[in-house]
Image: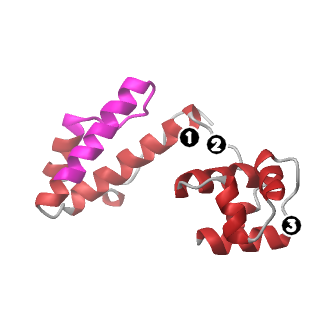
Amino acid sequence: MSGRLSPIPAQAIAPAKPKYLALVRKFPLRPIRSEEENEAALAMLESLGERQRVRALTPEEHDYIAVLAKLIEEYENKRYPRGPVTGAAMLTHLIEAKGITQAQLAAETGLAESTVSQLVRGTRPFARRHIQVFARYFGVDPVLLLGD
């Protein structure tokens, strides 16, 4: 390969509409390389969300949002990589989100407090029964608690 880009036939690309080009001039669509650029991109996205509350967005605005959101996603995935979540971490999150204690969870599910404590600490593996009880109690998909 020579390293050159192949020309794209003119008929393959629809011409950009003025509204889309105005958005690109306001905030150019290019890779995000810093936290400051990411914050600016998020602010642009938020302003378009606010505009949508006032009036319906045009197809060109939706296209712009789709590309900008993808650029933000790419930056944030590189900057803040997410690993798999353990069952213990998910259980801890669910307890905190519901605003209860481990003791309350144990009492309301019929599990021993020591069992709940061991599961939260990750010193005891989740059994199928634990996953079913917690999924039913918190109203979540059991898959969320399989993360180990």
Identify the mark nearer the N-term, 1 or 2.
1
Start and end of the magenta stretch?
24-50
**What is the image's colouring?**
secondary structure
Taking the spot 80% from the left edge, 54% from the top edge, the residue there is 119
Residue 139 image offset from top left, x and y in percent: 59, 72
**Percent position of residue 121, x then y:** 79, 45
Q: Earlier in the sequence, mark 2 or mark 3?
A: 2
Residue 104 in the figure: left or right of residue 14 = right
Three-letter amino acid code of the residue under disc 3: Ala
Q: What's the distance in space between the residues labelled 3 and 1, CA to CA?
A: 32 Å
Which secondary structure type mostly characterizes the magenta part of the structure?
helix
**Which numbered mark, 3 or 1, is in the foreground of this view?**
3
Measure how far apart labels 1 and 2 are at the Cα level. Answer: 8 Å
| Residue labelled with disc 1 | 77
For badge 2, the amino acid type reads Arg
When asked about the image quadrant of residue 112, the answer is bottom right
- Residue 2 in percent (x, y) is at 59, 33
User: What is the number of the mark on residue 127?
Assistant: 3
Indicate the quadrant where residue 111 lies: bottom right
In contact (CB < 8 Å): disc 1 and disc 2: yes
Q: Is residue 140 left or right of residue 72?
A: right
Determine if residue 141 is in view.
no
* Rendered image: mark on residue 82: 2
Please tell me which residue is depicted at 75% across the width and 56% down the height of the picture: 147
- SS category of the residue bearing label 2: loop
Amino acid carrying mark 1 in the image: Asn
Q: Residues within 10 Å of mark 1 (few under 14, many from 20)?
A: few
Q: Residue at x 14, y 49 (%)?
A: 18
CA gap, disc 2 to disc 3?
25 Å
